[in-house]
Image: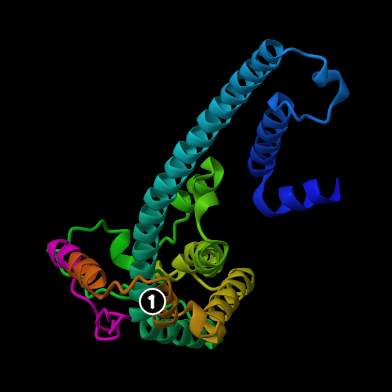
Amino acid sequence: MAAIQAGYARNGWKAVVWSYLANASLILVQWYSPASGVPMLRKLTEGQRRTIAHWGMEFIVVVAGVLLALWLQERVAHGNRLKDALNAEAAIHNELDENLMGLVALESLDQCRRDRLREIDHLLRTEGATRPILSHIILDVDDKARISNFQRQQVYTGMGENFLDTTWRSANASGATSAIDPERYRAIASLYASFALLQQTIDTDRDVSAKLQLLAYGTPLSPDVRARLIEAHTIATRNWASFHDSGEARTARGVAKSMKKLGWNDKLRMDELIRRTENQIEFSGYKLKPCVKPLKNPFD
């Protein structure tokens, strides 16, 4: 029994069954031999021995055929799992590229966010101030810009960055990632975890941005209004600081470094995404403020 368990642990159930079949074949040969040491079989005629051996071999052939069919079925299923994993990884790779492009855009706005937070802080510290902040945080808006009047007065906002994980969650739910090497899977999961934390920060920023938007309309800063704005400004400032204190792993260059370790050196792809973003800005008639830094390829 110990030998059977050891064989199963090493080779799986099919190897053990094949071993049994080989042993059964050997037994049949021994039975058929006139020198068989089995007393009952020594009483059988040669024809009876031949019949037993014939049916025994047929049984072995049938079982071997079933096992062969199961093995082939498993190989086909394994091939399909590998194909699904490759397709899923290609889609995941593309989703991570898009997320990285969003992080590149977010980093390009860093100085604008810092300058606006300082401006808001000064405004909130000035007693009785009602002066609105009419300028857009990142745009020098002119009449040619294809944006609404509301968008022209965005006090604190970004470029609409979103870090997605739809493809990743779908691949996990369907089991397509099960054939990915465990170490490689953990590395990809770590990238998505970093983007998930950044997305939480962005979602929080959107909430406080809606509150800070009150500063665009010259609303009198009553004590109650000022308190709400100070709270929103504090959260936005904390988010900005956490973005800088999160370590290299959550920077665009850090993400690119991790992707390179996965064999994804996407310099050309990132150049393409940067050109696409720049073309969209130009088509929209946006004129960016000097505080917006050029989009930089993190694979350079």
Q: Residue at x 80, y 20 (%)?
A: 41
Q: How far across and how far down the image is residue 161, in percent? A: 39, 64
Q: Residue at x 31, y 72 (%)?
A: 136
Q: How far across and how far down the image is residue 100, in percent? A: 37, 69
Q: In the rendered image of this protein, does residue 160 appear above or below residue 133?
A: above
- For residue 76, side relative to residue 190 (left or right): left
**Residue 273 seen in render:** yes
Magenta segment's dominant SS is loop
- For residue 58, side relative to residue 38 (left or right): left
Q: Is residue 298 one of those drawn in magenta?
A: yes
| Quadrant assignment, res 230 | bottom right
Observer-nearest of 264 and 111: 264
Q: Amino acid at mark 1?
A: Lys
Span shown in magenta: 279-300
Observer-nearest of 209 and 266: 266
Q: Secondary structure at mark 1?
A: helix
Question: Would you name the residue on which mark 1 appears?
Answer: 260
Q: Which quadrant is home to the C terminus?
A: bottom left
Observer-nearest of 122 and 196: 196
